Image (cartoon, grey):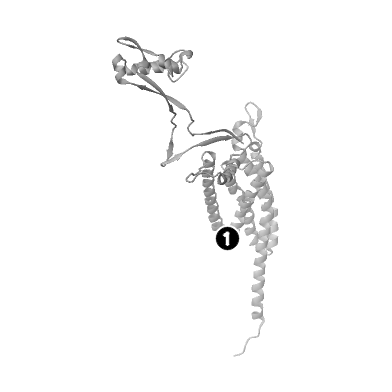
Amino acid sequence: GLEGIEDSRPIPGIEWELTVDRAQASKFGADIALVGNFVQLVTKGLKVSDFRPDDADEEVDILARFPEEYRTLDQLDRIRVSTDTGTVPVGNFLERSAQQKTGLLRRVDAKRIVFVRADVAEGVLVDDKVTQIKKWLPTANLPDGVDVTFKGEDEEQAAAQDFLLKAFAVALFIMAVILVTQFNSFYSGLLILSAVVMSTVGVLLGLLAIQQPFGIVMSGIGVIALAGIVVNNNIVLIDTYDFLAKREKDLRTAILKTGAQRLRPVMLTTITTIFGLMPMVLQTNIDFITREVATGAPSTQWWVQLATAIVFGLAFATVLTLLVTPSLLMLRARRIEKRRADEAGATAPAQGGAIPAE
């Protein structure tokens, strides 16, 4: 599942070191800088000038060097440089020796590091490969003192996940404070926030159904945005119930009326939101000017995970909200009625008892 694997270890090889005997070169009147120029003619080339083409922003170097058949190691020994006494072979004062090629040592915080990079094949998730490598590392028998740190997408994903988790927690805390303050009930506040849990489950089930991965950034933002949407249905239901509970003697009747009166607003809000996001879920781009409908455009791929998370989470949470919220309200209503019955039973004997004589 990995492609283009590479690392920053130095590649083994040799490099040729040219040593100039300055004393011997001075006898022939050879200039050391001139020797270097002739060596460049045999190797990478000697820069003589530069120019800037009309269709380019940067300058281009003009290099002079020998034809390709003369660019050999033996040619270094046959180079003749011009001196005051004539042309002199550089072999008279130049020695060539093979040395081991030196690599580049990279250090971060005084620790030597080596990068190992790779791309994943098409259709393979980066997170799956990272998890597989992490499971393999304990069995790799790495030397003592070797630490492995994952960078790249894994590091960015971990940072994004940490930020989104904190943002999600802060959002839930602020919503809980506002709901408890407005409804003056911890039970109502927790009941409203239960829709967030149901919507998150709906997101995961929806992604499993369409076999789409959970993206930390876009799907995470979708879950956070969804938290502010799904609570509206519970707010409408519980607010209506609190209003009717003050006017109805039977709390069960108040719950039934709440479901009947708020079914249409809840369903309309959900359906319009879902159908409004369906073009992004289906990656459909509608151009009203040219009257063209495009599918799978690059601009729509950014929003697929976000829209998919909201659509599936909202649909799942709405269905459960219409069932779970009235059930939990009925549970609290039964406890209230039971408490009232217990209080009435406790005060009845005291009211019917005999009055003691003085």
Of the pair 30 and 284, the residue shown nearer to us: 30
Given residues 248 and 10, the one toward you in this image is 10
Amino acid type of the residue tagged 1 in the rendering: Phe
- Residue toward you, 320 or 290: 320
Residue 124 vs 263, above or below: the answer is above
Q: Furthest-bottom residue in view?
A: 358
Among the 4 quarters of the image, the one containing residue 281: top right
The percent coordinates of residue 151 (x first, y second) are 51, 40
Q: Quadrant of the C terminus?
A: bottom right
Location of residue 112 in the rendering, given as x and y in whole percent from the top left corner: 44, 39
Residue of label 1:
186
Name the residue nearer the viewer: 152 or 285: 152
Per the image, label 1 sits on a secondary structure element best described as helix
For image coordinates 64% across by 54% down, the residue present is: 237
Whether residue 313 appears in this view of the structure is no
The quadrant in which the N terminus is found is top right
Report whether 102 appears left or right of 216: left
Q: Residue at x 68, y 57 (%)?
A: 326
Residue 74, position as x, y percentages in the image: 44, 16
Visible residue check, residue 337: yes
Q: Residue at x 54, y 39 (%)?
A: 153
Residue 337 location, quadrant: bottom right
